[in-house]
Amino acid sequence: MEYRLVDLKPGETGKIKGISGSINNKRRLTAMGIVQGKEITVEMIAPMGDPRIYSVLGYRLSMRNEDAQTISVVRT
Amino acid sequence: MNKIKDEFIADPKNGGSPIKKKITVVLVGNPNCGKTTLLNRLTHSKESVGNYPRVTVTLARKSCVHDGLHIELIDTPGIYALTSQSGEERETREFIHSGQADIIVNVLDAGNLERSLFLTSQLIEMGLPMLFVLNMSDEAHSRQLTIDHHGLSSMLGGPVYESIATRGEGIKALLDGMVHMHRQKVSPEPVFLPYDAHLERAVEKVQRLVFELHPGSFDHNQSRWLAIKLLEGDDQILVQEGEHAHLLEMVHRQRYDLARDHGEECEFLFAAARYGFVHGMVTEAVHAPKTATGFLDWTNRLDRIFLHRFLGIPLLLGLLWIMFQSTFSLGEIPMGWIEAGVGWISATVASHIPAGLVHDLVIDGIIAGVGGTLVFLPNIIILFFFMALFSETGYLARAAFLMDRSMHAFGLHGKALIPLIMGFGCNVPAVMATRTIEDHRSRMITILVSPFMLCSARLPVFILFAGAFFGEQAGLMVLLMYFLSIVIAMVAAVVLNRLILRRDENPFVMELPPYRLPTLRAVMIHMGDRVAGFLQKVAGVILVGSIVIWYLQAFPRHEILNHDYDAEIARFQHMPEAVMYHETINALKMKKSQEELEQSYLGRIAQAIAPVFSPLHFTWKDTVAVLTGFVAKEVVVASYAVLYAQNDGVKERSESLRRALSTTMTPWEAFTFMVFALLYAPCLGTIATIRKEAGGWIWAGYSVVFSLTLAYSLSLSVIWIGGMVS
Ligand SMILES: Nc1nc2c(ncn2[C@@H]2O[C@H](COP(=O)(O)OP(=O)(O)OP(=O)(O)O)[C@@H](O)[C@H]2O)c(=O)[nH]1
Ligand SMILES: [Mg+2]
């Protein structure tokens, strides 16, 4: 079942399927390890629900929901 | 000629062919992997570090001599990939591509190898001499990661070292490694990343054409690298090859075909291949324990508190409150000592210099101005101590995360928070730090609003005024000014967004580093830098400013006054029985100095400008203070100190300036002045930085006009409201 990364709840992990959106967006995410096949977990949520903290490749990054919207994942 | 002779010496072992005596080594790596800490250790420098990504925003050159070899080391802003777009990242990339470096030292975060190695996979293809440093190996150890250096070294095609930059471990071995690499002149092993057949075919085709177009100038590796870069769509290389329309057309076709066949743009096919290669390397060389990572436990636990959904923001505000409050109240104590010290020096010096011009210059000019500013040193030290703690622990990155949404609402980029908080310290590095904001418009907004943050240079003005006019509530008033500075910066951001600049957002993806215990060294560097900066200002612009103001006020000397006050005073002094004797004399003295002042250069200047500020109820002394503050905000306080020392005989420093001031304005007028001082025009240093960073006088001018307008209209409203209320 394919989801957007924003749809995952805290504690849930997904496998990255792909990134849509602008090339710049994609470049930046790719450089930081958001690439097809990697597992990504939702760790924490900011006070107003946006942005959220994810862990990927063993480190943590924060990302806005509008950017997480561009990433498709499958639940694992 | 001399320079060349210096750089090259004949090497006997090398058959007399000259080898360089001086080499350039560049440190390259992900943001926050410890490059600057390493550079500081390698070259005994004191560059700013911090536990958040993108501390370094410009190249820094330092040098050292090791084993007879002069090594110039270049620290670069961190990058995650060579395709990076923002200003400071491009600087790194351009330096790497410029070919100025003899050796590249790729700094890797040993606890974060898989991500770090992506950049490495791009670097090793360049075929330049490279060293690899597994920094933060203490953290890797505490996570029980074992890394096979030999394995990694043979896969990367270069020697691998280990270091703990914060403790200075592994520094000598690394320096030895650089020297060794240089002396051995081992030509680097080309590393060929395994791409799939489709990509390889495209690379080969492009490579062949590159070879033909640049006959004799590239070897196999270089042309292959160029081909890969072209296919990856590296804009810098595409521009560089712009004249070869034929080549570009071919590249374009290949990219198009590959994208069509794979359903993915070409550059991401390469990226996927790189990650595959990296993953293979990590699987082979890194052995992690099966059980969870003990080291990150702390970060997890702390984040659960500091990033709590409901507690997070109150905690952030509380921490800022503690910072501001301690800056003010803890600073009071040593401030008293310094005041007493300055008073003592003043008295001692005064008793040794005979009355006259020199006496006045030293006591009323230099000691008053410099001493009056120096008393705020403790406040500045405390403020920067807290700032250092915030940035060194990793909390600053968390603050940016917590506030991102709110910043967004004000039309600021989430990344703007770090420059804004830095603005509490000094606006100059704050403006520099906006480099990390990619989007031009968001960056310009941040540049324009960051000077509104109450910097440490303005702090003395508010401490002085709050103490003079608000007695018990002084601490609260200083806090209120901080609050005001934040609110105004936010409102200004909204206004700028609406009026001038359209928003165009970029992704806000930020690495959150683990919490780290601040090292004493890093905190000292951070504070030392700022304190030294402050002292430099005291010894420079404030000293000069004090003398100039003293001069302008004391001269011209022998003007004829309208009235012979001295004679009249003398007359009164000869009538001991006169009623109200003292008051009359004092009134006469006041009148005399008043008239002297009006005739002084300063009085004339101030009178010319006074009409501008009279709606704000500024006295001519306030006007002078405001004018001098254009140079640097610290001078405002020094000006007051000199102005009052000279005319009102404020000799013993302690408390007296406050007392002298307190009679000159009503609290509302004082508050008006504080608002004006908070907002009006950035200091010269900030203006120059804005010009440089924003790329033109227009922006600097814009900043000045904008802030002056805002300062004036807001102060006017304050005095107006004050008039209504009281
Ligand atoms: N535990 C540990 N911490 C380190 C080590 N090296 C650096 N640090 C810390 O890591 C943080 C980042 O260090 P910097 O030197 O600022 O990193 P940088 O690579 O220059 O970062 P940018 O300038 O942002 O690209 C600082 O808080 C350092 O104190 C290390 O070997 N071990
Ligand atoms: Mg750095």
Image: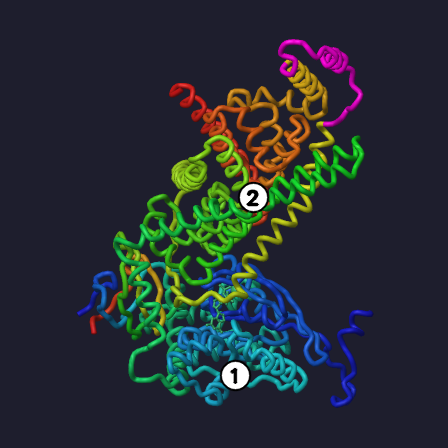
Residue identified by numbered label 1: B160
* Residue B336: mark: 2
Q: Chain of mark 2?
A: B
Please give the count of numbered marks on the rendered protein.
2
Cα–Cα gap, marks 2 and 1: 55 Å
Q: Name the residue: 45% across, 37% down.
A: B474
The secondary structure type at the circle numbered 2 is helix
Q: Position of residue B284 (x, y in %)?
A: 39, 87
Q: Position of residue B79 (x, y in %)?
A: 48, 66
Whether disc 1's CB lies below 8 Å from ligand 1 is answered: no
* Residue B201: mark: none
Residue stretch rendered in magenta on the structure: B554-583
Q: Residues within 10 Å of mark 2 (few under 14, many from 20)?
A: some
Task: Residue B497: tell me if it is visible.
Answer: no
Q: Quadrant of the C terminus of chain B?
A: top left
Q: Nearer the viewer, residue B246 or A25?
A: A25
